[in-house]
Image (cartoon, rainbow, N blue to C red):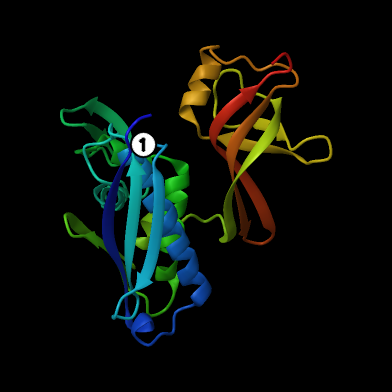
Amino acid sequence: MLERFTVEEKFSIEFDGPAFERHEISASALAQSLLALDGLARRSAEAAYGKDAGIEIKVKGDFRPGSFIVDMLIEHGDLIASTAGAVAILTGVIKLGKWAFGKKVREVQKEENGCARVENNAGAVAVFNQCTINVYNSARTRDQLSRLTQTLDMEGAEGIKVFGSDSQAETITKQERSFFRQDEGLVLTDNETESVLEVVGPMLNGAPDGWKFSEGEDGIEFTATVEDDDFLAAVRDRKITLVNGSSIRAIVRTVQRKKVRTRTERTVVEVKEVFNPED
């Protein structure tokens, strides 16, 4: 049995502005921001220590209004995935997001020490940690950044600062909120569950969009995006064969948004197992 190690990382988040000082901020908006922060912290920890890492996150209020301390207890194997820790990746994601104006970046060239050179939409080039790039370029991360910063849309909210003891503080101002805002409606619920799904319409070319799944004989049929790059590559390279009746055991993210009407979006975050009828 492989030896397991435990590491603790800690960082703080501060919501700035008179609305926080007067305790006049919407409780539901603040809750959504903290839930998004939890998701970003988990993704950063998985990038740093591996997807099999056990992650426990606790948030507690600080003495200053709008200020919270986040403790992450991470259990992982002896081989870690990144040269950077979880907090460094998290603050790096925010820094990269501001530099990229909230848009996906294009990787130009690999660099030494686990870094890569990337280009933003304006044609500027900079070097960031490879794990930071991978986390940021996920559509799910950019959605969480939108939810994290949604309090800045409210009157009296001026900025959000995230910082750790060994990482540079990163601040998102009210003006920079426009980089991260996604005009897809207010997030009502955002949950992840493990489910067994029948693959009704696979994208055999490995494309992430357009997959169709069913929850079973009495369940609903729905279209979803698949974010698991390893699974998509295996399907594209025919290392995984999907036939009529194939099923997967997967982590499924379900998001409900409200703009004019309420709509539900589903994303297959990770495929854990594939079942074929002959198995």
Residue 204 vertical placement versus 212 (above, below): above
* Observer-nearest of 167 and 263: 167
Left or right? Give the position of 87 relative to 195.
Answer: left
Amino acid on which the number 1 mark rests in the picture? Gly
Residue 85 vertical placement versus 275 (above, below): below
Left or right? Give the position of 40 relative to 199.
Answer: left
Residue 250: image location, x then y, percent: 59, 35
Q: Which residue lies most toward the front here? A: 1
Q: Which residue lies most toward the bottom here? A: 22
Task: Report the residue marked by disc 1.
Answer: 50
Q: Is mark 1 on a helix, strand or loop?
A: loop
Quarter placement of the C terminus: top right
Q: In the rendered image, is residue 104 in sight?
A: no
* Observer-nearest of 118 and 243: 243
- Badge 1 crowding class, 10 Å Cα cut-off, few under 14, some 14 to 19, many 20 or more, is some
Q: In which quarter of the image is residue 163?
A: bottom left
Residue 144: image location, x then y, percent: 45, 53
Identified at 26% across, 36% down, the residue is 82
Residue 20: image location, x then y, percent: 37, 80
Left or right? Give the position of 74 relative to 167.
Answer: right
Q: In the rendered image, is residue 76 in sight?
A: yes
Quarter placement of the N terminus: top left
Residue 117 vertical placement versus 57 (above, below): above
Q: In which quarter of the image is residue 267?
A: top right
Left or right? Give the position of 220 relative to 253.
Answer: right
Q: In which quarter of the image is residue 226?
A: top right
Residue 11: image location, x then y, percent: 27, 61
Identified at 42% across, 61% down, the residue is 148
